[in-house]
Image: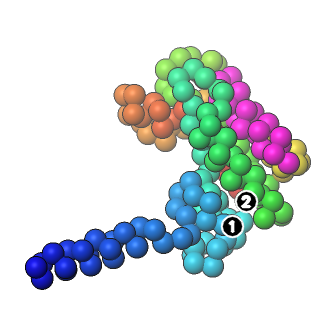
Amino acid sequence: MRFKILSIIAVAGLLSACAAPGGGAGGAGGAGSADSGYAPGSQEDLAVNVGDRVHFDFDKYSLSPESRYTLQQQAAWLAANEGVSITVEGHADERGTREYNLALGERRAQAAADYLMVLGVSKDRVQTVSYGKERPEDPGSNEAAWAKNRRAVSVVK
């Protein structure tokens, strides 16, 4: 009986720790919240409290609902950090020619930037650049690595 009670207390403690507010990566934990440990408006603040990247399907540059949500959070973060500008970097996986992937990376970066502007972020605060397949996040040659590499990343300037 005592073991069951201790087990229940331990599980309740773990669940309450998991439910703590503040958001993690991709969460809406608020720009530069006091407990985040990162300077408001910094790259770390964006990455940890909002999410700094969106991913794409193979050979696509359309935004998924999850990507739109992340970009909505980025737009809110940018509104809260008025002095911050970003560069949206477009990336592709290793498949395809260098030229094709540079063009695809540009379309991905532009799709993310355009959506941020639709959400009210000034065009003056958003630039784009494509790195194609030149800067992989994961150097592997498999579907898991390719999925990580098909992305647009918002970088604080």
Point out residue 134 in the picture as x, y percentages from the top left corner. Answer: 56, 33
Label 2 amino acid?
Trp
Q: Mark 1 points at which residue?
A: 31
Asked where in the image residue 57 lies, by quadrant, the reply is top right
Image quadrant containing the C terminus: bottom right
Residue lying at 53% horizontally and 57% vertically, measured from the top left: 25
Q: Is residue 95 visible?
A: yes
Query: Magenta part mainly helix, strand or loop?
Result: helix
Q: Are marks 2 and 1 in contact (CB under 8 Å)?
A: yes
Residue lying at 20% horizontally and 74% vertically, measured from the top left: 7
Vertical side of 66 occupied by 74: above or below: below
Image quadrant containing the N terminus: bottom left
Farthest residue toward the front? 1
Point out residue 122 in the picture as x, y percentages from the top left corner. Answer: 88, 49
Q: Does the magenta stretch include residue 118?
A: yes
Residue lying at 61% horizontally and 33% vertically, measured from the top left: 64
Q: How is the image coloured?
A: rainbow
* Magenta stretch, residue numbers: 103-120
Point out residue 71 in the picture as x, y percentages from the top left corner. Answer: 69, 46
Of marks 2 and 1, which one's residue comes earlier in the chain? Answer: 1
Q: In this view, does 124 lie to the left or right of 149?
A: right
Identify the disc placed on residue 77: 2
Choose between 15 and 93: the one closer to the eye. Answer: 15
For disc 1, the neighbor class at 10 Å (few under 14, some 14 to 19, many from 20) is many
Label 1 amino acid?
Ala
Residue lying at 27% horizontally and 78% vertically, measured from the top left: 9
Asked where in the image residue 60 lies, by quadrant, the reply is top right
Regarding mark 1 in the picture, which secondary structure is present there? Answer: loop
Choose between 155 and 45: the one closer to the eye. Answer: 45
Asked where in the image residue 28 lies, by quadrant, the reply is bottom right
Vertical side of 104 occupied by 4: above or below: below
